[in-house]
Image: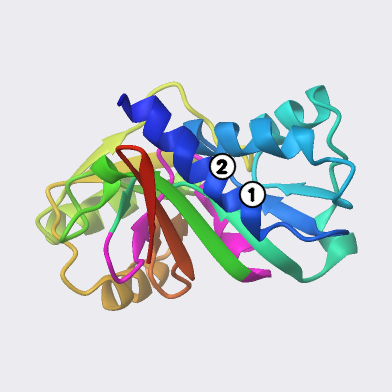
């Protein structure tokens, strides 16, 4: 079974969480796009969706799913999104698509965060996938120097601007042994808008697509 098929299995399993009248938070990325495909078939059942990025909003509208403003909705019952890496403790690295800030906001505003991944994304220790940092443009060099001091290798994501008008630094060569502590530390560096570690608000359920089955943590 291909990776794409495993992603589809995980995305389909997340559809079981939907209830009549839900306003559902929807993340960004290839696995989440499979969830959107399934959501289209159920759009008459839900109130609508809060998108975590302009790309997701565009895809939802294209498929006739009503897009809601988080400020109007308030607390969401569920949020469904993928991850670039995940541990069995449900700590995540997210932001490969550059939507980490809005993803973190929607996750924080949701009662239940369901993360959908294929089994290649499950790791023992976070950090092989570079950690995205959304940074204010004037702080790019300062934040990069702070990362170098920590033994990491920062790389500017060339030609990319976030939906919020900021830049992404991808941080290589880190092993995140204590994700909660490291996310807290990054949050205190001036100029970082959001770090791509999701540990202070981890996933509640992790759905992992395998060969012909989905594991739930």
Badge 1 marks a residue whose secondary structure is: helix
Name the residue carrying label 2: 12
- Magenta stretch, residue numbers: 87-111
* Residue 191 in view, yes or no: no
Circle 1 Cα neighbour tier, 10 Å, few/some/many (<14 / 14–19 / ≥20): some
Q: Does residue 178 sit above or below 169 in this rendering?
A: below
- Specify the quadrant that holds the C terminus: bottom left
Place of residue 47 in the rendered image (x, y in percent of width and height, measured from the top left): 89, 52
Q: Could you tell whether 211 is left or right of 178 in the image?
A: right
Please give the name of the residue rendered at 17% of the width and 46% of the height, measured from the top-left corner: 128
Place of residue 73 in the rendered image (x, y in percent of width and height, measured from the top left): 86, 63
Badge 2 marks a residue whose secondary structure is: helix
Place of residue 165 in the rendered image (x, y in percent of width and height, measured from the top left): 61, 38
Please give the name of the residue rendered at 24% of the width and 41% of the height, measured from the top-left corner: 120
Residue 28 belongs to magenta span: no
Name the residue carrying label 1: 15
C-alpha span from label 2 to label 1 = 5 Å
Please give the name of the residue rendered at 72% of the width and 68% of the height, measured from the top-left corner: 77
Residue 104 belongs to magenta span: yes
Please give the name of the residue rendered at 53% of the width and 31% of the height, measured from the top-left corner: 161
Residue farthest along the front direction in this orientation: 212
CB atoms of marks 2 and 1 within 8 Å: yes
Of residues 185 and 98, the one drawn nearer to the viewer in this rendering: 98
Of residues 108 and 195, the one drawn nearer to the viewer in this rendering: 108
Q: Quadrant of residue 5?
A: top left
Tell me, for residue 33, which label it has, or none: none
Q: Could you tell whether 37 is left or right of 214 in the image?
A: right
């Amino acid at each position: 079974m291909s990776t794409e098929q495993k992603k589809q299995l995980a995305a389909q399993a997340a559809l079981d969480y939907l209830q009549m009248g839900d306003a559902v938070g929807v993340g960004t990325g290839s696995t989440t796009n499979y969830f959107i495909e399934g959501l289209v078939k159920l759009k008459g059942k839900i109130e609508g969706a809060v998108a975590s990025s302009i790309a997701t909003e565009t895809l939802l509208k294209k498929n006739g799913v009503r897009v809601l403003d988080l400020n109007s909705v308030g607390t969401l019952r569920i949020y469904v999104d993928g991850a670039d890496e995940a541990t069995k403790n449900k700590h995540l690295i997210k932001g490969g698509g550059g939507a980490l800030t809005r993803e973190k906001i929607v996750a924080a505003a949701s009662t239940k965060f369901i993360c959908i991944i294929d089994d290649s994304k499950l790791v023992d220790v976070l950090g092989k996938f570079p950690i995205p940092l959304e940074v204010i443009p004037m702080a790019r060099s300062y934040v990069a120097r702070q990362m170098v001091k920590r033994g990491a290798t920062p790389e500017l994501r060339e030609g990319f601007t976030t939906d919020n008008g900021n830049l992404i630094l991808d941080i290589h060569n880190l092993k995140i042994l204590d994700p909660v502590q490291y996310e807290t530390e990054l949050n205190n560096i001036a100029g970082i808008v959001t770090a791509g570690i999701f540990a202070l608000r981890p996933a509640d359920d992790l759905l992992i697509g395998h060969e012909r089955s989905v594991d739930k943590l």
